[in-house]
Image (cartoon, rainbow, N blue to C red):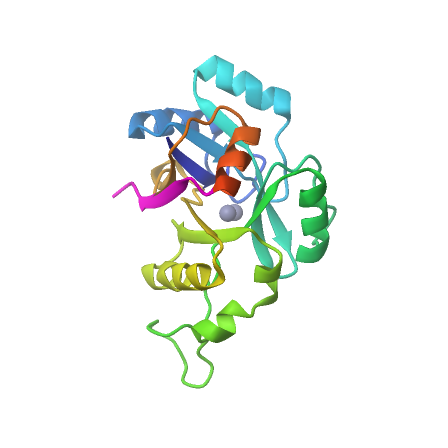
Amino acid sequence: MLIDLHIHTKPASPCSALDPLELIQEAKRLGLDGVCLTDHDKLWDLQELQRLRQEHQFLVLGGIEVTSMEGDILVFGLREEPKGIISPEKLRKMVDDSGGIMLASHPFRGAFIAGKEFSIPGLTLTIEEACKEQIFRYVDGMEVLNGENSDIENDFALEVCERLNLRGVGGSDAHTASEVGRCVTIFEREIRSEEELVRELKAGCFRVEKFRC
Ligand SMILES: [Zn+2]
Ligand SMILES: [Zn+2]
């Protein structure tokens, strides 16, 4: 099953120009099997998600992109929104209490890493240093394919992810229709609910792919 795990819609994410209905149409057109609504610090109402699924006969799942003190974190299986900017440690407690999963969003976006045009000698982050970043002590995984990241940033995240033996997921981080499906996560088993999504993410039965050209 092809699922885009990282999408922002309006008006829940003020930075997004993508309407939920436009998203569903585009996802169907592209041949995706499902999408996750991961708005900034905002959870969707479960009944509203159910209504979208039934009305459009399409898998629309919830999620949230939490603004943490150590960077953005995608969370699935969370039941309440954190109040204000939270530490990854506190978020971990909330996520564990609700049986969810935490994945660092677009790690290393904008960081000084080797190979980037503007990397500065002496300030360039090494893989070893990157692996020691606080956030990775609290997450189950990270995005190794994010549609907004450069290839260099994504490749660097993949290397860190593999070294730390964490789960590596893919998502488009779409804020417009043309960005939907840029990167996807392909699951081996069928997923029909957010609970099943969390279960499969924890099980690690998936791979990532750049989907939309
Ligand atoms: Zn945004
Ligand atoms: Zn995002």
Which residue appears at 44% of the width and 72% of the height? 127
**What residue do we see at 46% from left, 27% from top?**
191
Residue 51 coordinates in the image, percent (x, y) = 55, 16
Split into 4 quadrants, where in the image is the N terminus? Answer: top left
Q: Is residue 2 magenta?
A: no
Residue 174 visible:
yes
- Residue at the extreme top of the image, as rendered: 55
- The residue that appears at 68% across and 34% down in the rendered structure is 79
- Front residue of 45 and 155: 155
165 sits left or right of 212 in the view: right
Q: Position of residue 159 (x, y in %)?
A: 39, 63
Q: Which residues are magenta?
A: 204-213
The answer to whether residue 87 is visible is: no
Q: How many marks?
A: 0
Picture quadrant of residue 175: top left
In the picture as drawn, the residue positioned furthest to the left comes out as 213
- Above or below, 32 against 50 in this view is below
The reply, left or right, for residue 161 in relation to residue 136 is: left
- Quadrant, the C terminus: top left
Give me the residue at 62% from left, 48% from top: 66
Q: Position of residue 124 (x, y in %)?
A: 44, 78
166, 178: nearer the viewer: 166
**Residue 33 in the image: above or below residue 182:** above
Query: Farthest residue in the bottom direction?
Result: 122
Point out residue 71 in the picture as x, y percentages from the top left corner.
Answer: 58, 58
